[in-house]
Amino acid sequence: MSTESVRHTTSSPWWRTAVIYQIYPRSFCDTNGDGIGDLPGIISKLDYLSRLGVDALWLSPVCCSPQADNGYDISDYLDIDPIFGTMEDMDRLILEAGRRGIRIVMDLVLNHSSDEHRWFLEAKKSRDNPYHDWYIWRDGTPDCPPRQAAASFGGGMWEWVPELGQYYYHQFSAKQPDLNWANPEVRHALYDMINRWTDRGIGGYRLDVADHLGKDPDRGFTVRGPRLHEYIREMSAACFQRNALVTVGEAWSADPEQALVYTSPDGSELSMVFGFDHMKLDQAPGGDKWSLAPLDFVALKRSFAHWQRTLYGRGWNSLFWENHDLPRIVSRFGNDGRYRAESAKLLAIALHGMCGTPFIYQGEELGMTDPDYALEDFRDIEARNMLRDHRAQGWSEERLLTALRARARDNGRTPMQWDATANAGFTDGEPWARLCPNYTEVNAASQLGQPDSVLECYRTLIRLRKEIPVLTDGDFELLLEKDTRIFAYLRRDGLSELLVLCNFSDETVTNPIGPELWPGDKSCRLLVSSYPEAAHPASGPEACLPQYLRPWEARMLLKQNQEPDRKK
């Protein structure tokens, strides 16, 4: 039996060797000409995703919604929004993806609903309505709200309802009232909904703002409330501990030690969480997300190392650079001009060499960039509220534009760039959002089958994760911790060693990794590189340790030990 067969017949969950691809449905592929991506569009691209090699598709919400927050304000959890298609389309997507060995992961928005959800419409009718306590209400007067704090999308967290003489609580938009998780009727209604989707064939769930579910506004807890883990364990027992589901919690507040609680190997909570420590390191200390600062590269390396070491053998990591809430990583931490392709590949190699489950956001595998929008092009609710609030604080138009181009969620939501035809092959109609102008050069059609493309680099990395056990099982050692340009680390599992070597700069630098750390021998193999002339696997010491690293050069190298390392 092959090594790969052994790994897949053990009790190790499928998602530990998987790569998951996130789709933002309204920007992926439109088939009916209305300018908004849809479920049939996703189905039409399943062969592309199968060729890429991904194991699961995480869909941002496709349930019925007024779209105040682009689907993260759900008005019916058990039906598909007509802009995306029908329930029959969803069933067909699950079926067709499954035929290609791809699972569907749904986005669960459990912290809040839309204010147009039937539950909230009932809750607003009277204090005695059976649904009133499904949300969080407090008495007050129009000029004196309860304990006030800023909502995540600007403004306050309490919204006045004059006909009731009460405020309702919302951590995000006023169009997104928070559900009252302290009410067991709410929790069990949500569990029933989740189980009904699982019965339709859903393979896992991403939990939006999972760390908010235990909130206690009266005591000032917006995240990590006192009952948070009680609720998650209850939900896991009721919903997740069957059918080999993968579950991922969004947890902006989590550090590695807290992630251990969420991801305990006993399976009592979640498979993994999205921790965002590494995505806060170009933010000015004490400022909000719009307060920009140069990336602290040494802190970035230390952050990755801390997560890798803390969770190794005890929890599980998610690995990601991008999602629907973040700008494009090649524009943020790479060089999206002269070295766009090289830095996009470097960022992929740096991430995919670590321990955890990698996530790819649509277009990341092409090296898509931020679009350099004008102020009027930013349409997201958070961006609009930022403009209102920061103009009131006296920010100049230039500063506003710089901040939005660097941080706005719109940057990652431009339509997928399929080819060089009109509207990048995304739609025959008018796209709901303006495309990134470089789509005629940066697109899937131009990269398919091109061995040195960003797309083919991602295909190689996905394949390697399924073939090389050290990528899944090896420990992690950060090298050159204080180097301000080189990110290098070792992975070891006793049978093999993997070295990842990345030059995060526009300069050619002397390679600081010498043969005393990585002795050359015939077993040394170059697996993947960010430069064309080194892209094809080669063997021997000369393939392993070049004298210099070119701008944005990355190499992933493998050595097989002759005998298992008994010290491990």
Image (tube, rainbow, N blue to C red):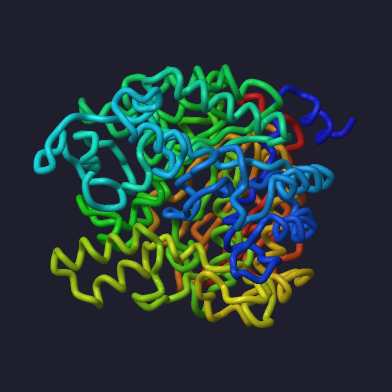
Task: Work out whether 184 lies above or below 294.
Answer: above
Quarter location, residue 534? bottom right
Q: Quarter-wise, where is residue 556 in the image?
A: bottom right
**In this rendering, does residue 542 appear at all?**
no
Q: Position of residue 97 (x, y in %)?
A: 77, 47
Up the image or down, 472 lies above or below 481; here it is: above
From the viewer's perspective, is 127 left or right of 540? left
Query: Viewer-proximal residue, 269 or 194?
Result: 194
**Residue drawn 63% across and 33% down?**
246
Instruction: State whether residue 350 appears in this view.
Output: yes
Residue reaching furthest right?
1
Point out residue 561 in the picture as x, y percentages from the top left corner.
72, 38
Above or below for 152 versus 230 = below
Point out residue 127 in the picture as x, y percentages from the top left corner.
29, 26
The quadrant the N terminus occupies is: top right
- Residue 388 x, y percent position in the rendering: 23, 64
Identity of the residue drawn at 23% across and 34% down: 164
Residue located 21% across and 46% down the image: 156
Please give left or right for residue 202 compared with residue 125 in the image: right
Image quadrant containing the C terminus: top right
Which residue is depicted at the point 75% across and 31% down? 563
Is residue 412 shown above or below 275?
A: below
How many numbered badges does the structure rendering display? 0
Q: Residue furthest left?
A: 143
Closer to us: 278 or 415:
415
